[in-house]
Amino acid sequence: MPAPFVNWSGTVTSRPSAWARPRTEGEVAALVREVRGRGGRLKVCGARHSWSSIAAGDDLQVELGGLAEVIEIDRRAMRVRAGAGCPLHVLLDALAAEGLAMPVIGSVAEQTLAGLTATATHGSSLRVGNISSLVEGMRMVSGAGELVELGADDPRLEGARVHLGALGVLTEVTLRLREAFRLEERRFVLPFDEAAARIRELGEAHAFAKLWWLPHTESALVFTYDETDAPGERDARAWAVDAWINRNLFPALLRLGKAFPSLIPRTNRSVAKLHFRPSIRRGRSDHMLQLVMPPPHRETEIAVDLADTEALLRGTREVAHRDGARVDFVVELRFVKGDGGWMSPAYGRDSCQLVIGGAYSPDIDRVFDGFRRLGQGLGARPHWGKELALTPAEVDALYPRAGEFRALARALDPDGVLRNPFLDAILGPSPG
Ligand SMILES: Cc1cc2nc3c(=O)[nH]c(=O)nc-3n(C[C@H](O)[C@H](O)[C@H](O)COP(=O)(O)OP(=O)(O)OC[C@H]3O[C@@H](n4cnc5c(N)ncnc54)[C@H](O)[C@@H]3O)c2cc1C
């Protein structure tokens, strides 16, 4: 019996008919043609970090561990070409060794380049867009089994930069870079109401800025980041302590809340008291922006127009506290510069993206439901890599260029070889 597909959080599983691990582009092409020939489907997974079922296959499941190298760093053009299965942390270290950096990253660096771009993974900046917006080229084996190269001038690139795994099996990704830079991180605590009123202005004033709020508490932790030449580097011991806390102490507190949900509000208040403290750190940009891996949990996330930042945060507090709900995980608010990616949640508008999560909260389904309805009222676009439910009609209403994306997917994958139940649900029935 083939191993099941299981995502990082353990919340999505599927039963592929088999697994394949092609090591070269030629092997990928042969595999796609074979699956197409027998009328089957295949789904590539990256690091399986998505909370949505976007990477879960129902026929052949493919891993691309063999196409995971940094291929060429072009300092003159300020771009890097790497295998689609390359984990972000491998790329970041290779760039740092050359005095270069990614202009923006998210909170962790385990994901693959193909996976990050499929879902528009983002950090928190109104000066740089999500990681998909940095794509300057792609190479893929289309669903028809043909090699397709999209360069920076190819009009299809805007459609493919947030590819949802629906266009082809990516084999290479080319990304825009910048000179290495150092950041100063400042953390400070604000009363919730003041934080809600000021966070947009802070997002606009700093290179990077974000906010954490623990439900059932009255304060928020604000992070701002600005470039600096001042010395300093991430403290390896503090990082190890944080990693230990996230592996041991935090899961123990979450389990306590699982056994006694009525303790969740009190536990959150204790965590906020201990953890939400002012501090200043400096170091390599990616070291400042990354966090230690959190314990497994569930997440959903939506993107709204920047103008609705305060309404989204205040609405989220209302949803998290409604009818005595208990929520045991941090709410995170971030910013993303608008871009032109057809399926990007930040398409055409500077955005505020907000995550709400839960580990064992008994009320989390109802809270996620309330959050979804809050988002609907604000014209929110869900993050493709987080828990979501969207019909094709809703996708069309939210994404003005969804029709063009569907047409591109049909042209590159005429038989729906790259479809899975997730893509069928959001794009409509498979063409195959
Ligand atoms: C701890 C944690 C922290 C996170 N932090 C952030 C964050 O800060 N910001 C944010 O926006 N998101 C964040 N995420 C979400 C995560 O970045 C996305 O879900 C991302 O897509 C995961 O990448 P992956 O390599 O795991 O891809 P997977 O989840 O395995 O796959 C995602 C999609 O990519 C497709 N795919 C993978 N490889 C290929 C290929 N070679 N060709 C074609 N399609 C392919 C899959 O089919 C699927 O459609 C986080 C997730 C976790 C678990």
Image (cartoon, rainbow, N blue to C red):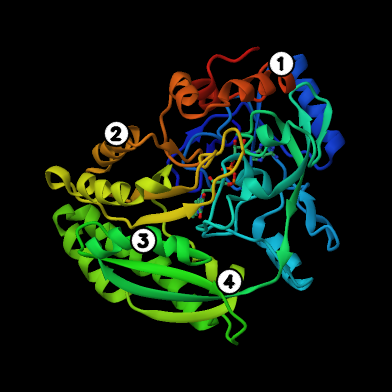
Q: Please, which residue is most extreme toward the bottom here? A: 231
Q: Would you call the spot at circle 3 few (<14 residues within 10 Å), some (14-19), or many (20 or more)?
A: many
Amino acid marked by disc 4: His
The residue identified by callout 4 is: 287
Q: Confirm if mark 4 falls within 8 A of ligand 1.
A: no
* Front of the two marks 3 and 2: 3
Cα distance, mark 4 to mark 3? 23 Å
- From what the image shows, is residue 144 above or below residue 73? above
Residue 361 visible from this viewpoint: no
The residue identified by callout 3 is: 199
- From what the image shows, is residue 399 above or below residue 334? above
Which numbered disc, 4 or 3, marks the residue that appears first in the sequence? 3
Left or right: 171, with 300 as reference point: right
Amino acid marked by disc 1: Pro
| Residue 373 - label | 2
Q: Quadrant of ligand 1?
A: top right
Cα distance, mark 1 to mark 4? 42 Å
Residue 181 visible from this viewpoint: yes
Q: Mark 3 touching mark 2, by CB under 8 A?
A: no
- From what the image shows, is residue 197 above or below residue 307? below
The residue identified by callout 1 is: 414
> Residue 109: horizontal and vertical position, in percent?
59, 59
Cα distance, mark 1 to mark 2? 35 Å
* Front of the two marks 1 and 3: 3
Q: Would you call the spot at circle 4 few (<14 residues within 10 Å), some (14-19), or many (20 or more)?
A: some
